[in-house]
Image: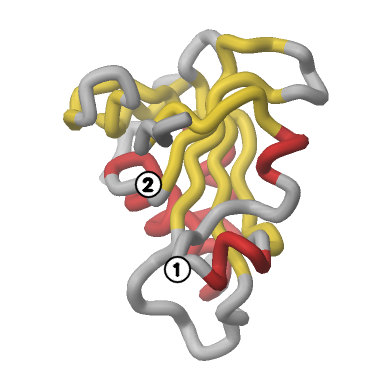
Amino acid sequence: MPDFHKKYLIRQALDPNTGQIGLEIKIRADRIQGMAKRNNKDDEENAITLIEALRNPNAIFGGLRLDDDPAWFCYAYRPVKLSSDRPENRVFLVFINADMVAYNWDWAEADSRALSRGEYLPDDYKSRFRKQIYPVKEK
């Protein structure tokens, strides 16, 4: 059982620079605790998916254009097994700030062109993010 007296839960994530697990990501304990208190199926699935996304992302993007901060990341993940009510055209996104805090996560529409190539990437990823940093795409 996590210690919710701490401000953050620390979880190991895939480091986009090395391709190995070892990057420490902080998750606000109060957000996870709030999810646990609500005790609903979606929150439970999202908490599990959050950890899976950090460890096994389909893609990691660097630099959110909206915030104009190149130090921020977005981990994109599509679980192999989905709950029955999760549409096929969705991808789970985890946003990481410059302090390595997972500050937001949620399901988003997947890019239809990427889906046709078998890739699970968020809709408008080319305009939302500065670049895809994992896996590295050849130019």
Foreground pick, 88 / 95: 88
Q: Residue at x 70, y 63 (%)?
A: 109
Nearer the observer: mark 1 or 2; the answer is 1
Q: Residue at x 33, y 32 (%)?
A: 3
Instruction: Give the image location of residue 8, x and y in percent.
Output: 43, 23
In front here: 80 or 110?
Answer: 110
How many neighbours does mark 1 have within 10 angstroms: few (below 14), some (14-19), or many (20 or more)? Answer: few
Picture quadrant where residue 116 is located: bottom right
Residue 46 drawn at (x, y percent): 50, 59
In percent of width and height, residue 95 lies at 58, 33
- How many labels were placed on the picture? 2
Disc 2 marks which amino acid? Pro
In the displayed image of the protein, which residue is found farthest to the bottom? 84
N-terminal label among 1 and 2: 2
139 with respect to 90 (left or right): left
Taking the spot 63% from the left edge, 37% from the top edge, the residue there is: 104
Q: Is residue 30 visible?
A: no
User: Marks 1/2: CA distance?
Assistant: 14 Å
Query: In the structure shown, which secondary structural element does the residue marked by tag 2 occupy?
Result: loop
Direction from residue 78 to residue 131 in the image, left or right: right
User: Can you say whether 80 is above or below 22 in the image?
Assistant: below
In the rendered structure, the answer to whether residue 60 lies left or right of residue 136 reads: right
Q: Residues within 10 Å of mark 2 (few under 14, many from 20)?
A: many
- The residue labelled by disc 1 is 118
Up-down relation of residue 134 to residue 43 (above or below): above
Give the residue pinned by disc 2: 57
